[in-house]
Image (cartoon, coloured by chain):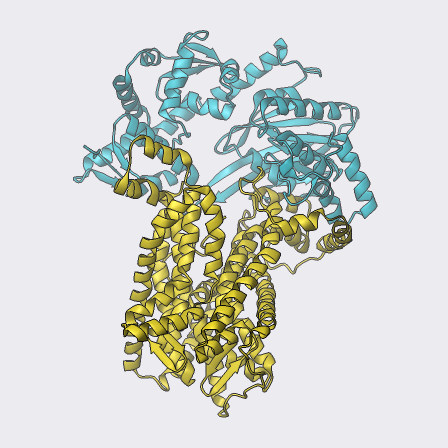
Chain colours: A cyan, B yellow
């Protein structure tokens, strides 16, 4: 930002990443046609839900994975292997447990042939910058999560990379620790005390993206595409309660909930088995409905507010909301979620009535549920192996998604008493123990 | 904590690779036997000092035996690091090496003692070095396969994020191996090594004194001492040997393994402070002594520098193979490789059949088949019997942490006790009461191996969640129902780990235990173990190959069709 002649440091062109599915034939892209760039002095956040391929994209940029199609260049040089000018900070910290803090920080330069004295000097400086003085001889086991991640930062900084890549660096930390680390890093970055030209951070935390970055790229899920790009010009230091801050957060919530609800795409998907379901339990669905129905929301809740009060990340909140939407029990409206009339009635029902509603709504709105029931009806034995449906699903989605979808439908079907499922035999039937 | 079944994760039914591996292993052994046949002269008996039963010799013998164990440990480590690394790093080698390893685990190496002795004596005619190497090799075979499997599995399960760090920092193959892969594998490898040592003591005793045909070789060591004591029927010498063994095993455990296990705790990847922290007074002493620290620091610094040397391994695998389409391995090369391996295996299998065929008729094969069935029944029944006796006792102990802590090391210790020490007592009893050898000798088979069941079941019961036992009490679940619905499912994976180990050891033990000598009495039970032991005594090589091949086949099928099925079920449905 200080440099008027902002040059493009990183360029990602039409990257597509495809992982072969189990059968090897039908392949589902994780990333599709992703293009982006990173300029000198920029802090960019890649925001997406789980399954949007955001971590995959980060690994492609780092040269840890090779894209199926497309090209990545750093300072004009194509990336063909682990790139020299980048260093990564991991969600899980990824420290070597058998090395103490100093050795963990020194391993990068030493492995790359930096002389011993220089390594030591750089390591101590990085440790000092990041606030780890006094912990040099501690082992990761002895450190708290926050301290561990500081080691992760020091280890990246000591490599003196041009680009710092961060893969959800704060999501494994508790709320208070995460906030301290965020502000510490932001201060260092703002004051130019770390020798890094640009930062690219992957996150699923909307507020974190708004708090820290200059530009936000929102990735859609399955396949991952860049859905929208938002400039964030709120001046530093940013205040979470500031109206412009709230407005931007609301805007992003609206963006992220509205997309999958796009009528055309939704209905086309719902027409067949291509609809993949998230991991949700009927208990949390009911709990969410009750939460929205109760004061202060009274049937209509602001998503950021709801997430905050429940301590939810978007990966907890959106799957629930979308499943409620699918079952026609709630609807998204901009950055709000609102109960439908049926949803409102559901809250006051007793267990048997609730089971009935879930069963009916699943049959009416989830093609897989009605498909399973139809097959069971048609067969004289009224039994069907799960493998049959799994294979059908795998025509449309990856193995993991198919498994998850089936699991969720089994949960809904059992709750709604649509069918029984025997885990040992892996078969659907109508038989429940008498 | 547990020594897990290293190979249990693999598919269940034997496939073509297992057949190939089986053929190759048998052919190698056949080749050794054949080369011996080429030399018609009797084995050159090396000049070895006569074993004396005087007690004052025992410390020296113990030292020699302990050194043999040490040498074997060294070779096992060398083997492990090369074999497992090659298998983990190269897909094509993996296709061959892992099935070979799997079959080798099922081959009763004790049956091949005669071959290996012959082979090593042939290398150094008239020299004790040959016999020494043969004994070391026998111990080696009791450890190396298991260790290699452990390392291979660790190398395949290196945490992804740590692997990415190593790659991101562009560590070379050498650097990555010593900074990441070897440390990561360390706790499992050390634990497995320690557990394999128990088997090693059994083997060293069996291999120090061995008779092949007309040649008897005795190496100075506790094993030979025991053999001589058995020959002479010297009870007090047996007692002295038991005491010496106990001391040696204890020293090995306290001075070598406990410190290493405690030290290896720092390589565990779980970042939380471990629930079970191993401690060793020796390690504490070393780590807290100032001058030891001072002296060891430069050594560690040098080792670290060496481990960070930028040595590149020849590229056996494309680094990005897994995720890129370009990295797809060439199918044509694969086909050529498979064909080559297949050709060698078919040729090898043919040679084996030819060799056995020179002396052995189909009737003999059928006879050995029946004998192996006897041994199978024996092993199976004894495992069942041992389980019935020991599982309730072990559960009782395991649910009482104080007891468990005290008993577990004892069980591990007893597992290392060589069965030969009981020959005198057994034969005397059988002769005195005119007992049926087919029944009563069987107990020797399980003598050393039952402790694995005890050891693992105690571990399982100790790990059983306290809230579940409390819930059972709260709902008044008692008696038979408590066993079937609460405790047995809870300890199943642990118990099976022990039972599988015990079963494998029992097959090996049958070679020693079905054919027992005490003074001038020979007592034998019908079974493939005594068949092999007798053929070894007569130096009848085709029969040994036949017996061992048959036993290996049985062990392989018994493991795959029975134990692994059970284990997979327990892992899937019963793990807590």
- In the picture provided, is B338 more to the left or to the right than B383? right
Q: Quadrant of residue B561?
A: bottom left
At which x and y percent is residue B214?
46, 88
The one nearer the camera, A21 or B254, is: B254
The one nearer the camera, B426 or B465, is: B426
At which x and y percent is residue A373?
24, 32
Up-down relation of residue B45 to residue A267 (above or below): below
- In the picture provided, is A177 more to the left or to the right than A319? right
Q: Residue at x 39, y 43 (%)?
A: B575
Kindly tell me whether residue A310 is visible in this rendering. Answer: yes
Q: Specify the farthest residue to the front.
A: B236
The one nearer the camera, A130 or A6, is: A130
Q: Residue at x 38, y 45 (%)?
A: B396
Q: Quadrant of the C terminus of chain B?
A: top left
Q: Specify the farthest residue to the bottom.
A: B41
Q: How many marks?
A: 0
At which x and y percent is residue B377?
29, 65
Kindly tell me whether residue A25 is visible in this rendering. Answer: no
- In the picture provided, is A250 more to the left or to the right than B282? left
Q: Specify the farthest residue to the left.
A: A380
Q: Quadrant of residue A36?
A: top right
At which x and y percent is residue B499?
38, 56
């Amino acid at each position: 930002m200080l440099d008027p002649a902002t040059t493009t440091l990183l360029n990602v062109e039409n990257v597509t990443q495809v992982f072969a599915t189990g059968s090897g034939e039908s392949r589902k892209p994780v990333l599709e046609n992703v293009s982006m760039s990173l300029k000198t002095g920029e802090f960019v956040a890649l925001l997406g839900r789980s399954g949007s391929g955001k971590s995959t994209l980060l690994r492609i940029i780092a040269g840890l994975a090779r894209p199926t199609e497309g090209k990545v260049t750093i300072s004009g040089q194509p990336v063909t292997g682990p790139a020299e000018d980048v260093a990564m900070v991991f969600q899980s910290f990824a420290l070597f447990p058998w090395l103490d803090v100093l050795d963990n920080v020194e391993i990068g330069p030493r492995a790359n042939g930096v002389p011993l004295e220089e390594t030591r000097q750089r390591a101590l400086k990085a440790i000092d910058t990041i606030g780890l003085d006094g912990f040099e001889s501690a082992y990761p086991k002895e450190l708290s999560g926050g301290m561990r991640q500081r080691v992760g930062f020091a280890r990246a900084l000591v490599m003196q990379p041009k680009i710092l890549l961060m893969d959800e660096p704060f999501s494994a930390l508790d709320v208070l620790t995460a906030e301290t680390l965020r502000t510490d890093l932001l201060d260092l970055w703002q004051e130019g005390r770390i020798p890094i030209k640009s930062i690219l951070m992957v996150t699923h935390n909307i507020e974190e993206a708004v708090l820290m970055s200059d530009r936000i790229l929102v990735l859609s899920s399955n396949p991952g595409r860049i859905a929208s790009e938002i400039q964030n010009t709120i001046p530093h230091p940013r205040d979470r309660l500031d109206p412009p801050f709230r407005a931007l957060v609301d805007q992003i919530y609206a963006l992220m909930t509205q997309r999958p609800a796009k009528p055309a795409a939704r209905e086309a998907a719902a027409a067949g088995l291509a609809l993949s379901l998230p991991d949700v339990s009927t208990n949390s669905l009911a709990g969410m409905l009750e939460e929205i129905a109760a004061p202060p929301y009274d049937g209509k809740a602001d998503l950021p507010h709801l997430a905050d009060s429940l301590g939810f990340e978007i990966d907890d909140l959106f799957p629930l909301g979308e499943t409620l939407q699918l079952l026609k029990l709630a609807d998204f409206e901009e950055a709000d979620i609102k109960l439908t009339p049926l949803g409102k009635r559901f809250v006051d029902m007793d267990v048997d009535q609730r089971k009935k509603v879930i069963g009916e709504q699943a049959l009416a709105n989830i093609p897989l549920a009605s498909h399973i029931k139809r097959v069971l009806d048609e067969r004289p034995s009224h039994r069907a192996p799960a493998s049959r449906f799994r294979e059908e699903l795998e025509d449309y989605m990856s193995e993991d998604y198919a498994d998850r979808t089936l699991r969720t439908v089994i949960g809904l079907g059992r709750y709604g008493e649509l069918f029984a499922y025997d885990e040992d035999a892996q078969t659907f039937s109508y038989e429940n123990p008498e | 904590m547990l020594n897990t079944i290293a190979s249990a994760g693999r598919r269940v039914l034997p496939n073509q690779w297992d057949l190939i591996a089986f053929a190759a292993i048998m052919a190698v052994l056949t080749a050794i036997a054949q080369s011996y046949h080429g030399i018609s002269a009797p084995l050159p008996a090396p000049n070895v000092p006569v074993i004396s039963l005087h007690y004052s010799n025992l410390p020296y013998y113990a030292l020699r035996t302990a050194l043999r164990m040490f040498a074997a440990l060294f070779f096992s480590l060398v083997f492990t690091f090369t074999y497992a690394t090659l298998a983990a790093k190269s897909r094509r080698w993996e296709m061959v090496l892992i099935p070979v390893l799997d079959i080798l685990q099922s081959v009763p190496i004790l049956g091949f003692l005669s071959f290996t002795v012959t082979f090593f004596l042939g290398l150094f005619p008239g020299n004790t070095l040959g016999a020494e190497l043969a004994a070391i090799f026998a111990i080696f075979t009791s450890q190396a396969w298991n260790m290699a499997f452990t390392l291979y599995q660790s190398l395949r399960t290196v945490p992804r994020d740590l692997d990415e760090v190593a790659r991101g920092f562009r560590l070379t193959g050498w650097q990555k191996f010593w900074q990441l892969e070897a440390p990561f594998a360390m706790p499992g490898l050390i634990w497995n090594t320690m557990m394999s040592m128990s088997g090693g003591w059994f083997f060293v005793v069996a291999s120090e004194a061995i008779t092949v045909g007309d040649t008897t070789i005795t190496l100075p060591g506790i094993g030979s001492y025991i053999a001589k004591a058995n020959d002479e029927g010297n009870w007090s010498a047996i007692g002295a040997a038991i005491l010496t063994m106990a001391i040696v095993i204890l020293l090995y455990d306290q001075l070598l393994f406990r410190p290493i296990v405690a030290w290896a705790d720092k390589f565990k990847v779980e970042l939380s402070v471990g629930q079970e922290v191993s401690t060793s007074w020796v390690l504490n002493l070393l780590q807290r002594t100032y001058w030891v620290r001072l002296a060891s620091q430069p050594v560690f610094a040098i080792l670290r520098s060496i481990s960070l040397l930028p040595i590149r391994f020849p590229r056996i695998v494309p680094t990005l193979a897994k995720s890129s389409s370009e990295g797809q391995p060439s199918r044509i090369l694969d086909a050529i490789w498979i064909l080559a391996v297949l050709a060698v295996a078919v040729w090898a299998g043919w040679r084996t059949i030819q060799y056995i065929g020179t002396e052995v008729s189909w009737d003999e094969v059928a006879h050995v088949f029946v004998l192996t069935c006897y041994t199978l029944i024996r092993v199976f029944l004894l495992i069942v019997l041992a389980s019935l006796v020991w599982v309730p006792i072990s559960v009782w102990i395991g649910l009482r942490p104080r007891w468990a802590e005290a008993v577990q090391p004892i069980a591990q210790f007893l597992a290392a006790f060589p069965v030969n020490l009981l020959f005198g007592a057994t034969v005397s009893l059988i002769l005195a009461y005119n007992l049926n050898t087919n029944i009563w000798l069987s107990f020797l088979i399980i003598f050393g191996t039952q402790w694995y069941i005890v050891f693992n079941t105690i571990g399982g019961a100790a790990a059983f969640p306290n809230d579940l036992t409390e819930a059972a009490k709260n709902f008044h679940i008692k008696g038979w129902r408590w066993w079937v619905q609460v405790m047995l499912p809870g300890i199943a994976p642990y118990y099976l780990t022990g039972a599988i180990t015990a079963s494998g050891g029992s097959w090996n033990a049958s070679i020693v235990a079905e054919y027992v000598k005490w003074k001038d009495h020979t007592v034998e039970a019908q079974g493939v173990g005594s068949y092999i032991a007798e053929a070894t005594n007569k130096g009848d090589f085709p029969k040994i190959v036949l017996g061992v091949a048959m036993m290996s086949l049985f062990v392989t099928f018994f493991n795959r069709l029975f134990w692994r099925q059970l284990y997979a079920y327990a892992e899937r449905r019963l793990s807590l």
